[in-house]
Image (cartoon, rainbow, N blue to C red):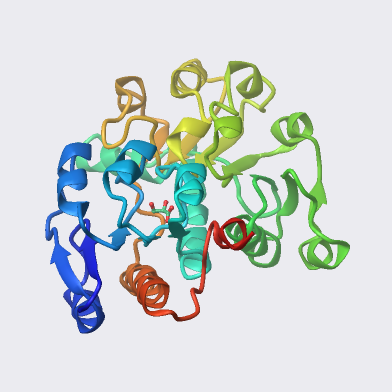
């Protein structure tokens, strides 16, 4: 008998077809996220779960689904999963790193540029019919080339952004991360590790790419924003909860920070109304990894992991593999 799996959201049908070759599949073919109760009901009796970053995988859910052996996410972030609870119950968790690195870095860079060069704000102005004359200072923003790029979180995506900044735009790269890159990794980027305070005070454009954990909750608060240059921009493609959004809205509204680019929000898909009311923030709906090839690659990696996990194969990107093996 084939193992039973649940696919907890709408994905590419050909990925579903691949999974059907190996499993008895229940496919929740909707974009509306399953509520915890719906997820629990559908997952009962299943050995595998294909999920994303929106389903809450809690100890309670795992206790209600004792047959579950593997949770395979198509996202790199897994802050929606109680990893310790998975490990304690022998449930393998996999995520989808690497395949989205370059696409997400492209988007982070684009968002930073849009904020610095006031692209959204000026487009709205034009569409409203407010453009009546050319002016020397019309939507004059900040330069990217030759400026200082500050990266908070220097994992794969942070490094890919640093590469774009250093090699493509002649930016000076400074970064703050729990662990420093090796000199061999820093050298080609001219990247310099600095304290968080120095990062905030020196960056012309700061990009946030840290994983969201209890430690990184509201890592950027009012006192941190106060260290930034008035001319600086802040871009967040990590998770909304890393930044205190009210403090950010306050700083942007008072002109203590020039602009922001935000792809992620603490209460998403609800967006803080104070941010919505501001012109100097570019807002996008959590789409940094959303190119068609990359979203396909993310789904296929999760499917590969699920197939391997439940058929005795080699799992590619386990989150708690080492802990489970111990
Ligand atoms: C990820 O993969 O974590 C992206 O943020 C999409 O949720």
Residue 210 position in % (x across, y down): 59, 44
Q: Is residue 21 above or below residue 167?
A: below
The residue that appears at 65% across and 23% down in the rendered structure is: 224
Q: Is residue 18 above or below residue 122?
A: below
Any part of residue 56 in sight? no
Residue 216 in the figure: left or right of residue 297: right
Locate the N terminus by quadrant: bottom left
Q: How many marks?
A: 0
Residue 311 position in % (x across, y down): 37, 79
Q: Between residue 60 and residue 130, name the one nearer to us.
A: 60
Q: Is residue 7 above or below residue 202?
A: below
List the single residue furthest toward the bottom.
21
The residue that appears at 25% across and 72% down in the rendered structure is: 3
The residue that appears at 18% across and 80% down in the rendered structure is: 17
Q: Between residue 9 and residue 233, name the one nearer to us.
A: 9
Locate the C terminus by quadrant: bottom right
Residue 19 in the figure: left or right of residue 141: left
Q: Between residue 10 and residue 28, name the one nearer to us.
A: 28
Any part of residue 321 in sight? yes
List the single residue furthest toward the right.
183
Residue 136 position in % (x across, y down): 48, 39
Picture quarter containing residue 161? bottom right
Picture quarter containing residue 307? bottom left
Residue 143 position in % (x across, y down): 60, 47
């Amino acid at each position: 008998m084939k193992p039973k799996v649940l696919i907890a959201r709408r994905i590419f049908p050909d990925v579903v077809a691949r999974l059907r070759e190996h499993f008895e599949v229940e496919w929740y073919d909707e974009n509306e996220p399953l509520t915890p109760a719906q997820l629990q009901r559908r997952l009962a009796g299943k050995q595998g779960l294909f999920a994303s970053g929106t389903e809450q995988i809690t100890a309670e859910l795992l206790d209600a689904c004792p047959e579950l052996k593997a949770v395979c996410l198509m996202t790199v972030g897994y802050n929606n999963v109680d990893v310790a609870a998975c490990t304690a119950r022998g449930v393998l968790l996999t995520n989808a790193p690497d395949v989205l690195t370059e696409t997400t870095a492209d988007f982070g860079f684009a968002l930073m540029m849009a904020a610095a060069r006031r692209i959204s704000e000026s487009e709205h102005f034009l569409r409203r019919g407010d453009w009546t004359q050319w002016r020397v200072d019309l939507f004059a923003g900040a330069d990217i080339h030759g400026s200082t790029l500050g990266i908070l979180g220097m994992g794969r995506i942070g490094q890919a952004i640093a590469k774009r900044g250093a090699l493509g735009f002649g930016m000076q790269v400074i970064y703050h991360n729990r662990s420093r890159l090796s000199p061999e990794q820093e050298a080609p980027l001219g990247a310099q590790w600095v304290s968080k305070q120095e990062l905030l005070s020196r960056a012309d454009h700061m990009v946030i790419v840290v994983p969201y954990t209890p430690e990184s909750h509201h890592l950027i608060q009012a006192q941190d924003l106060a260290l930034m240059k008035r001319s600086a921009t802040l871009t967040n493609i990590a998770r909304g909860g890393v930044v205190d959004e009210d403090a950010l809205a306050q700083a942007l509204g008072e002109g203590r920070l020039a602009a922001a680019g935000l792809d992620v929000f603490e209460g998403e898909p609800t967006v803080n109304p104070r941010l919505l009311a501001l012109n100097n923030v570019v807002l996008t709906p959590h789409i940094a990894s959303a190119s068609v090839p990359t979203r396909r690659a993310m789904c296929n990696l999760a499917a590969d992991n699920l197939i391997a996990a439940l058929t005795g194969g080699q799992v590619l990107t386990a989150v708690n593999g080492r802990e489970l093996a111990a």
